[in-house]
Amino acid sequence: MTQFQTLEDKLRMAMSGMTRAERQLASHMLGNFPLSVLGSVSEIAQDAGVSAPTVVRLVRKLGFSGYPEFRMQLHEEMGERLASPIAKHEKWADNSQPDHPLNRFATSVIDNLNQTLSQQDLRVFDTVAGILADKSRPVHLMGGRLTRSVAEYFTTALHVMRSDVALLPSLPNTWPPALLEMSERDVLVIFDIRRYEPSIMQFAELAHAQGVEIVLLTDRWISPSAGVAQHILTSQVEVPSAWDTIVPMVALVEALLSAIQERNWQETRERLDRMERFYEDMLLFKRMR
Amino acid sequence: MTQFQTLEDKLRMAMSGMTRAERQLASHMLGNFPLSVLGSVSEIAQDAGVSAPTVVRLVRKLGFSGYPEFRMQLHEEMGERLASPIAKHEKWADNSQPDHPLNRFATSVIDNLNQTLSQQDLRVFDTVAGILADKSRPVHLMGGRLTRSVAEYFTTALHVMRSDVALLPSLPNTWPPALLEMSERDVLVIFDIRRYEPSIMQFAELAHAQGVEIVLLTDRWISPSAGVAQHILTSQVEVPSAWDTIVPMVALVEALLSAIQERNWQETRERLDRMERFYEDMLLFKRMR
DNA sequence: TCCATTCTGTAATAAAAATTACAAAAAAGA
DNA sequence: TCTTTTTTGTAATTTTTATTACAGAATGGA
């Protein structure tokens, strides 16, 4: 094997050939790697809820003669991580089936991603990030049949960083009430790729008439809603498939989230801290029941 | 509360009160911390050019009862280092490049995508695509807080190609009725990345008890639901941001959709044709109003 | 339903690691 | 320069850890 395989990779690749106890142990190891494997065999066994011989069986299954040899590679890897954290690049050539559909797909989607992200108008990107980071301006989001998932994801993640973020409901006939709340201070983020949805365009026109600022994320053929949008970000959607990909659009959304976070890091951090404590409290609550 | 003193701090502070051999050892430890102290007492002694009792004398001088106690604090400190997303962001922010955030983000997400897709077990991928392409087997999908969007997207797209595809509702207390419909013929597709959701794991165990075949899409630390999953596909989730990315997972889902479509192209094409006509009829209907 | 095979945990054993005892070397003070 | 104290390494002992043997449980196939 030409490619050096990390312990984590070995554990993942071997997962399907493991017994139940081994899989439980491997999940535990991977769940808090590398900390979970720093102790002794009996410590690891106890933490994972398996026996000590199971630990030895697993590392032998991974190709080591015993746990000391496994630990040696662990220490080597930790040395490499500390020496050069961003040193590695995985290659495609090692994969034995270059014509596998997954590999053909991968090439295409990565090209799309490259194209989408490299061809963004950075001024538009920065403007949109600034608008969405502005907490005095409520943000409403909407999407179509496939893009609604992206809109929902964006809403969930953006809501972690700021309040006044809402996803419009699915059914167009519930949209008019939302219009009543919108004014010049509001921002509407629309996700619309082919097939463009007439109901989205109608709503965009009505929102525009209310003075709402409209951000449109669409494909390269540009949704008809562009006529009333102030800011347009485009994504590639073509792959060797019968329909479109949303991977570049999701990546664009995550890039926006990252930029918004940078602008409001101090406040975002406080919200994250609070949310962390909510999680901990909920877990504690569950434990006490 | 006084600030917790790290092992490195202790070593530095104690340097002036050390003997020659101890100072030689401490310099060695600090020179390549923490790697230099991961081995056994005799290994460390040999590497530093002192005797094993000298190692024990030094850690006792630092206030530990023996080397195992020293090692315990070492492991605790390493655990803290690998802790929270906030720490991750601060690390990334410190190393920021002069480039635009979007370009930095692009590099990272493409690396992740490369890593995710190149490291897939093609046999597991093909097996999962085959299972999901089998129209005699109903497919149920579920996701967590962020991954629900991916599950929803997968459901919408898969439903274009075949019937008997259903997304479980959002609220866990609505899940048990869905269990009543599931048997050994059914397939459950679970999206679960950290933070893993206990309700998902509980449902997975119940579904497993019913004989349902479980496909798990998770991150590289492997969701605890892995214990009852027959097929596991992993995705990278780490980006230079305070939380995770789902771009690789979305790409993996689209790759599966593409593979499923290839297997059933003739029937998929017919469904697409019919859907095209539905669209056209609806547009015509709207034009006539 | 029964039998054979595989898996897993417990206990025993072997190996490794940490600590202690002791003696020699080095350093400091008179 | 000599004596005393401190430091340090070697060897022995103790403790801990890893591995192996074995038996019971679980699973799968006939």
Image (tube, coloured by chain):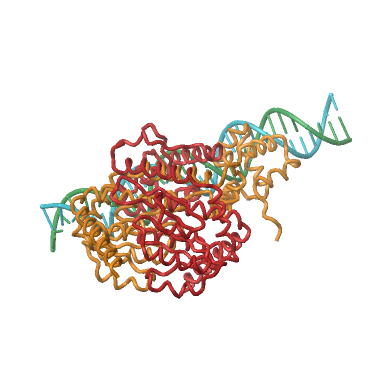
Chain colours: A red, B orange, C green, D cyan
Rendered residue at 56%/67% (across/down): A184
Give the quarter of the figure containing the N terminus of chain B.
bottom right
Depicted B120 relative to depicted A161: above or below: above
From the viewer's perspective, tell me whether residue C12 is left or right of residue B36. left
At which x and y percent is residue D18? 43, 43
Depicted B104 relative to depicted B218: above or below: above
Task: Give the total of numbered labels.
Answer: 0
Q: Could you say which is closer to the camera, residue A59 or residue B201?
A: B201
Q: Could you say which is closer to the camera, residue A205 or residue B118?
A: A205
Q: Could you say which is closer to the camera, residue B272 or residue A21?
A: B272
Q: Is residue B280 visible?
A: yes
At which x and y percent is residue B25? 65, 37
Q: Is residue A51 visible?
A: no
At which x and y percent is residue B259? 27, 48
From the viewer's perspective, tell me whether residue A140 is left or right of residue A25. right
Give the quarter of the figure containing the C terminus of chain B.
bottom left
From the viewer's perspective, tell me whether residue A194 is left or right of residue A86. left
From the viewer's perspective, tell me whether residue B22 is left or right of residue B76. right
At which x and y percent is residue B70? 60, 48
